[in-house]
Image (cartoon, rainbow, N blue to C red):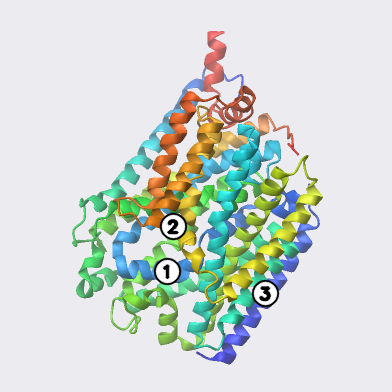
Amino acid sequence: MLNSHPLDEGLMMNTKSKRKLLWAVVLTALSITWLPYFGVFNTASMVMGLPQPLAVIIASNIVLTVCVILIYPLYFKPFIKKLEEKPLHEEAVK
Amino acid sequence: MNNTLTAVVLAAFIFVFILVSYLSKRNSEKASGSSSENFIIGGRGIGTIVLVLSMGATYFSTWTLLGAFGAYYRSGVWFAGFAVWTIFHAIFIWLFGARIWLAGKKYGFITPGQMIKHYYKSNRLRITVALVGISALVPVMLIQVIGGARALEALTDGAIPYVVGVTVTSVMVGVIVLWAGFKGTAWTDSFMGVFFASILIFTALYVLKLSGGAGLFEQVSQYKPELNVVSGNPLGMLELWLGLGFGAWVLPHMWQKFYSASSAKVLGKVAMATPFWNSWMMAIIPLVVGMAAVIPGIAPSVNVGNSDTILPQIFNFHFPILSAFVVAGILAAAISTINSQLLSSASLVAEDVVDGLTKGDMTSKRVTWVTRVVVLSLTVMIFVLAMLPSGAGFLVPIASLGFGLGLQLVPSALGMLYFKSVSETGAFLGLVLGVVVMALMTITQIDIPVGPSIAGIIVNIVVTIAVSKVTKKVPESSVVEFHDMFNEYMRDNTGEVVYSEEKKA
């Protein structure tokens, strides 16, 4: 990984772009969940059997759940790989 | 409720509890590593399933089986923000938990205070962080013991008197922590988490069947249409969101769970599983049951005043023969939270306060010994206070601020995990003033738009930033040991930056 080939760069850039996209989606979904608290999407009408504000919150929750699952390949996998490449030298402070 | 059946179910529950404790004790005897590391954080050897279940069961207390249902019954979909902040528990595992695990693994930390001391080179900040952590945990433990015992007494119509509830809870918690340490608490947490989650799932399915499944909310709108819309008050939700959301990683007993993970892979899998356990299970199911309770025939005797007992009321009305399982479930939910808080509080006293005030470092065996003594002392203290008629009265206001106190630890923790511009003096003064503001607001009951937790954290952040700008930065060695390590392993780990640097060279 440390001596990555130039051809890999596109792939690596891609990972960083995906990470940015992930956080954009997380922040958007989070913002949407707050809208009913400010009176937006907050009527008593039903959307697929759910009250409108609850439907908004549940939909955001589904999106956030998917985002959390994507954290594993986008963040934990490179982290685990890095730890395999360069194991920690443990230095107990006590 | 059938008292004989209740006694049989509780006896079976206690038997399984002791069996799981014994198995965990036997397993932990095989572990390598130092004595205190094994006792306080399970020898950094906890796997995915136990860690997911243990973190969930520890975070969700008796409140999930009692208070959450009532909150939905009273507030309706306003309280659905609960589901979102529990999703963020998983995101926080990457943002904070993985960094805490990495530093803990590298430098052998077993308490948050040790990490604070190593980074800020500050004993006063270490002791203050420990004291704030203990203040956040101990009163909550006491309230859990009292609340659980009162619920048991009420549910069994006095067949399990208050004194028996307090004694059983205190003895079970004390025994498991003293006998089997962290691994024992984690394994029994898992057993108890599965137990009370089974009760939740069963109740939700039954209530959905009674209320017409997909038509549940249509029916709610016939009886209490105001519950189907959010009643505003975004600041109220923000306060809950910050306190309960951040509490999932910054409170000491949750922080130490991160140290206990056996690998980064385990933490990653825990993060993936957390939304399903914390949000869809523990937050959405109470939503379904709590709101369905407004429909006639689901929980006929429920009203706003007794809405925190919706679950027992449903069982008493529809399945009186199974009510004993709810009693055992409440006991399970209480114990699975208190045991981790007890062990964590004791380790903070031993490792951060006693060691911090002692000249020279204590040995690992000595830390374990002191932790055991503190566990025993805290158990006795909680038992005695719970038995005094007004013993806990003065602690109730503090207990209600538990998560808010935990929130005050966030700026100093963020300095260590993300922001090298935060200085020791800034973190120390921010923390102290944040807690003082919270205390003053609680005592004076001053009426301003934000609550004590938010006011405290605002002051805390402002003071931390302002003072850090004009005081000495943390040593360069701390930046290298923490921030550079985090960057190398967790941020610049795709190879892209290294290649660019090579190209420049």
B171 or B317, nearer to the observer: B171
Specify the subunit that label 2 lies on.
B
Q: Residue at x 61, y 29 (%)?
A: B485
| Residue beneath disc 2 | B279
- Amino acid at dot 3: Val
| Label 1: which secondary element | helix
Q: Residue at x 76, y 57 (%)?
A: B28
Disc number lying in front (3 or 1)? 1
**Where does residue B482 sit, x and y in percent of width and height?**
61, 30
Asked whether the beta carbons under mark 1 and mark 2 sit within 8 Å of each other, the answer is: no
Q: Residue at x 45, y 80 (%)?
A: B312
Q: Earlier in the sequence, mark 1 or mark 2?
A: 1
Distance of label 3 from label 2 (alpha carbons): 27 Å
| Residue beneath disc 3 | B16
- Amino acid at dot 1: Gly
Q: Is the residue marked by circle 1 packed among few (<14), some (14-19), or many (20+) residues within 10 Å?
A: some
| Label 2: which secondary element | helix
Do the residues at pointers 3 and 2 share their chain?
yes
- Amino acid at dot 2: Ser
Distance of label 3 from label 1 (alpha carbons): 27 Å
Do the residues at pointers 3 and 1 share their chain?
yes
Return the mark for residue B67: 1
- Quadrant placement of the C terminus of chain B: top right
Q: Residue at x 78, y 52 (%)?
A: B31
